[in-house]
Structure formats: C-alpha cells, structure tokens
Image (tube, rainbow, N blue to C red):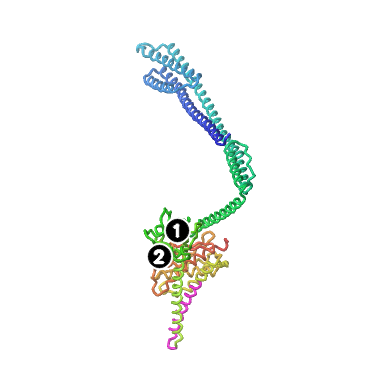
Amino acid sequence: MRIRTQFLITILVFGILLVGISISVLVTNRRVADAIDQEVFATRVAQGASELSYLSNDYVIYHEKPQLDRWQSRFNLFLNDVSGLKASTPEQQVIISSIWANSRFLKEVFDSVVTAVGSSSPGQDGIDVALLQVSWSRMAVQSQGLTTDASRLSQLLRAQANRLTQINLIAILALISIFTVYFVLTYFIVQRRTLRAIAFLRTGTSVIGAGNLDFKLDVKENDEIGDLSRAFNRMTADLKQVTTSKMELEREIEERKGVERALQFERDKLTRIMDAMEDGVCIMDSEFNIEYVNPAMRALFGDVNEKRCYQYFNGRNDVCPRCNNQEVLGGQTLRHEAQISKTGRTYEITDAPLRNADGSISKLAVFHDITERKKVEQLKDEFINMVSHELKTPLTVVMGALSTAVDKRVSKEQAEELLGDAIVHTGILANLVENLLELSRQQSDRLNIQVQPTDVGRVTRGVLQKLQNKSAVHHLANDVPETLLPALVDPIRAERILYNLVDNAIKYSPDGGEVKVSARQEEGYLVVTVSDQGPGISGEDQARLFQSFERLGVTVKGSIQGTGLGLRVCRILVEAHGGKIWVESEKGNGAAFVFTLPVASYH
C-alpha cells in the first residue's frame, strides 16, 4: 500500500472515530444534564406533596378560607412541577403516570372535603366526622403515594445520571485510547517504514554519487519510496550507458563537477561570510544596478526593490557627483568616509573590483559604521582639552603663588596666604590625578580593593579637615555617630568617595550653606549621605550623573568646574565594595548623595 493511501486511511478512520465519540460525549453530557434537571423536579414534587398534606390537615381541622387558598395556590405550583417531569424510560413513564393519577385523586378528595364543608349550614352541629376522617385518610394515602413515587423517580434519575456519567467517562477514555493508537500507528508508518526507507535511499544515493554506477537500490515496496528508488536506478543505468564508451567525457564531466562544486562551495562560503558580517555589504554592476545586499545592509537601508545604488543609498534620481564606479571598475580599490543622511551615521566605505564568472566586473562596497568611533575620538579630544585646561589652571595658580611668595617684597602674611592658595590648588591637582588613576585602573581591570575594618567617622573628619578651607561660604558638618560600627572597606578608597562627594557638594552649591555628612546603619550596611543646600538636580540630569565626563550646567564663580570624573569614580569604588550609590534631589531643594558600605561585623 502506498504511504499516502495509508496516511489518508489512518486519518479518515481516526476522524470518523473521533467525530463519533465526540458526538457521543456531547449527547451523553446533555442527557446527564437533563437527568439532573428531572431529579430536581422530582425532589420538588416530593416536597410539594408533603406541603399539600400539611395544608390539607390544616383545612380539615379549621375549615378556614385562608387555608383553602394556600392549598389551591400550592397545588397549582405542584402541578407546574409535575408538568416538568419527562420520562426517558418506560419505568419512569409509569411513575410519572402514577404521580399524575395520584394528583387528580388528591384534588378530587380535597374538593369533596371543600364541598362538604361548604354545604354544612351554620345551624348544624358540625360536619359529618366520619366523612372527614375518611377524606383525611384518603388524602394522606394520596400524599404518601405522591411522595413515594417522587422519591422513587428521583432515585431512578440519580441512578440514570450516574450511569450516563460512567458512559461519558468510558467514551473519554476511548477517545484517549484512539489518540494513543493513532500516534502509535503514525510512528510505525513513519519510523519503521518511511524513515528507514529514506535512510536506505540516502545511503544508496551516496554510493551512486561517489561514482559507483554498478550499484542498484533494492526496490521492495510498490510505494512512493519504491518509485523514487526505481527512478534513481534508471538514472544510474542511463548515466552508465552514456559514460561506458566515453571515458574521456566522463573524466571531463567529473573534473567539471569538481570545479563546479568547488566554485559553488566558495560562492556559498563567500555568501555565508557576507551574510554573517556586521558591516553592510553591497554588490553593484557597471549600470548602478544592485546585485546583492547582505542582511546588515538591508537592516540599515531596507529592501532594494530594484532601485539603483544612488536611489537606494542617497534617495537621488541621478548619479552621485563623486561616484567612483569608473575607478573601481578599472581595477582600483578605494577607501573613503561618508555620512549617509538616510541613516544619519558615518561610514568608512571600501570599494573594490569583483570579477564575475562571465568576465564582467562588479563593484563590491563594504560599509563599516564608524559613528561611535568618531564620537569617541571627539570625546577623547574634548577630554584632552578639558583635562589640559583643568591641569593648567591650578598649575598656573600654584606657580604664580610660589613665584610671588619667594619675592622678598611680599610680607610674611601675604606669603602665607599665597602658600595656602598653592596648597589648595595642589590638592585640586592631586584629586584630579587620583580620579584619573582610579578610572584607568577600573578600565584595565587593575582595581584592587584592600578591605579592613574602618571607622567611617574618622575618615569623614579627615576629609572635612582637608576641605574646610576650600570655601568661605560653606559650613562643613559631621553628623556621623561615634557609636557607628566600622565598615569593611578600603580606607583610602572610602576617603576618595567622601572627598569627591563633599568636593562636589561645595562646588555645586555656589551660594554657600551647610554641607553635611551623615550615616546610619541598616541591616548589614552603613548608609552614608552627603547633602548640600544648593540649587538641586533635575530628573534629566540625575539620569546621567554617574557617567564619565558628565557635568551639570552650574557656574561656580572663582572655582574649577571639574572634569566630570568625580561621581563616576565614586560609583566605581562603591560598587567595587558591593554597595550602591544614588542621588535624592528636587530642583531648588538641594541634593543628597547616598551610598552604602558593608559593615565589618556582618561580612
């Protein structure tokens, strides 16, 4: 049997069984629901019969019209419930018929009692007691019969619902079994027959492809695999017949096949290389038609859609003024930089000649994105200029102060003031150089932290003492508790962090005020805060605070603006200790720089 026929038969049989069992499950579910509904009706009928018996007794005893009205109203509801009963088996039909008969008898007996009560005149001593006793007994018998029939019907319906539920479960299990059988059959059809036949066919074709034209595939089945095997055998026989008497032609064909395979391999290899390149690659002919673009180029400029190169890259309708096609097609390899307006980025473009199999020459263009490199070069130049300026300014002050201080015409007080200025600006120079060194160590993975238990209060006092003379309009406050546990840090790096933060607080609060260092312990970390009363920091500036060479737009009269390295170095050193650093500020309300350090006793 053919594989396709087997699959169709299997799917057809599976589909028929699946549809049949699914319909059976749905029908069974519907019947279960109906049985449950009928059971509810039967329960209500039994309850109604009991209530009617109770109301009948009330009327027989008291003969009052309200009891009569309640009985008749409840009997009407009772009849509605009886009307809802539907039989699905002969036994249920017999019980429902009995319920209807008992209902009618109950109504007739009760009506006779009502008639007897209504016909008695007021002057009579009373109603015939014997008649009432007989009527009461008959109503009790009918009510009991109704209750018994309703209870029996409820039991039958419950048993029917349970039986249908079991049938439904069996149907679901059968459906699962059919799924299992289907997948097992599919496995045997595909694995044991199709896949093995394909594996055998692949082995045979490999032998034939290796040049053994005497090999024949063993055809056992009359199916698609057998047809394919016979086709391969016919192809092999025809090829052998053609090449038997033409050995030279065979050799030439083999050589040509080898060359073609090598060319195809190299072409595929080159295509794979170009497809995998991050740089954009484009090949165009002498008529500016684009023959190939790799995925990276397509991601930059979109699909070609039969555009010529000047349309694709620059959105022009004519040849670019500085097009170098003639030089490249003449055999030259050229390199140049160009900013493409379509992407807004700068590329280093290498144009090289590419010889095709037919002898024609195309141009191979490789686009290397150097935008970030250009930005880095610009940033490097700006940084060099900035650092040169920042080094030159304090050096000029130091040199001028020292030169003036050694002048004999300068008084002792003036000389001491000049030396103080030289010391302050020497500290600025040392701070700048130390920040540059820390950044260099981090970028070259040479940042070694030597941690030891360190008193943060002592480090804070040392930093504030060094910076106390930097500004006459600031008050430096130490709010670090003396009872604070020591931190497990590198004391030199801890001093560098605090120095940079306090220095920044002084620098960026030009109107003066208090610069306070405080600390508290939270679990296993010390939380240190350096706060100022400056103009505050906007949310936009906060997002780039801890990046290299970022400075806020605040002008500080008479002081150095800085290189933007201080906060970046703080972040590097804090994270090297396993801590975190952040800023809390609102525009106009000062700023608080907060960082955490591990407590020695916890680590």
Mark 1 closeness class: few <14, some 14–19, many ≥20 residues within 10 Å: some
Q: Is residue 416 magenta?
A: yes
Q: Position of residue 535 (x, y in %)?
A: 39, 66
Residue in front for this viewpoint, 133 or 505: 505
Which quadrant of the figure contains the C terminus? bottom right
Q: Is residue 162 magenta?
A: no
Residue in front for this viewpoint, 255 or 581: 255
Mark 2 closeness class: few <14, some 14–19, many ≥20 residues within 10 Å: few
How many numbered tags mark residues here?
Answer: 2
Residue in front for this viewpoint, 15 or 332: 332
Eyeballing the image, is 394 above or below 577? Answer: below
Residue 122 located left or right of residue 479:
left
> Mark 2 touching mark 1, by CB under 8 A?
no
Magenta residues? 408-434
Q: Determine which residue is flagged by label 1.
A: 285
Residue 533 located left or right of residue 519:
left
Amino acid type at mark 1: Asp
Please tell me whether the stretch drawn in magenta is mainly helix, strand or loop.
helix
Q: Position of residue 86 (x, y in %)?
A: 46, 22
Q: Determine which residue is flagged by label 2.
A: 322
